[in-house]
Amino acid sequence: MIDSSSYRLYGRTKGRKNKKNNSFSKIRLKEIDKTKYNIIDIGAGFGESTIKLAKENKRKIVVCCEKYIDGLNSLFNKAQIEFLKNIYIYQGNVHQMLDEYCEEESISEIWILFPDPWPKKRHFKRRLINKFFFDKIYKYLKTGGTINLASDSKSYISQILKTIYLIKDDFLWLNQSKSEWDYNSEILPTTKYYKKAKKNGLNPFYAKLMKI
Ligand SMILES: C[S@@+](CC[C@H](N)C(=O)[O-])C[C@H]1O[C@@H](n2cnc3c(N)ncnc32)[C@H](O)[C@@H]1O
């Protein structure tokens, strides 16, 4: 547990034009029931990944953890249109969600697609994926649980690869061959930041790891 002042998040919480009330608060985060198959989508942005996961796993719980209100409103509206009842929303920092709501060994699957790259060296410490983060989620993941990551930032990919090496005794890297690192949009969610990467001619990196 870290003290609540450390849950501060950088970056935008609300779009410039957002003046209206936010509807997503109608969905309340339940305490995660560890007996269920729980999927956590961290930093889901506008929620394309959460919707895809929820549609493909109707009997499972999908928790979207995001701080960006406009994105959560968009997710809420899409979930209503698609009659999806298996989505829960946590607005805030994933570290706080884990510390305050999650039980140990309660998560079956984690998704983190295109986390904020923080490209300046002095901001690298703001990046979400590092050894500290893996050490933390190890506790909350079930044995055999998976973590799915994607990024299009060369320096972040290099940091992720170094981290994967550091945690090799705790996590098995399931798609180790280079041909499997390609972010194939037919299988994986077509998110806003995935589309942005493709438009910029980038080839995003995808990694899937399993807790051993
Ligand atoms: C670059 S966007 C990617 C959004 C989406 N996954 C996509 O692929 O389009 C990263 C998102 O992560 C969210 N985020 C960053 N750090 C977070 C944290 N510690 N907990 C929850 N959300 C976080 C940001 O608010 C932002 O919406």
Image (spheres, rainbow, N blue to C red):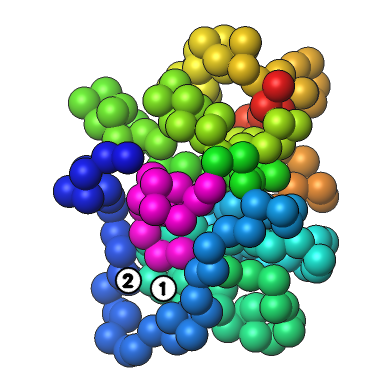
Q: Position of residue 28 (x, y in %)?
A: 50, 76
Residue 154 seen: no
Q: Which residue is mark 2?
A: 15
- Provide the secondary structure element on which disc 2 rests: loop
- Provide the secondary structure element on which disc 1 rests: helix
Q: Residue at x 76, y 61 (%)?
A: 60
The magenta stretch is: 90-103
Q: Position of residue 38 (x, y in %)?
A: 68, 54
60 vs 17, left or right, is right
* Closer-to-camera residue (73/101): 101
Q: Residue furthest left?
A: 5
- Residue 70, numbered circle: 1
25 vs 33, left or right, is left
Residue type, mark 1 in image: Asp
Q: Position of residue 132 (x, y in %)?
A: 40, 25
- Label 1 environment density (alpha carbons within 10 Å; few <14, some 14–19, many ≥20): many
Residue type, mark 2 in image: Gly
Q: Tell me which numbered mark, 1 or 2, is placed earlier along the sequence.
A: 2
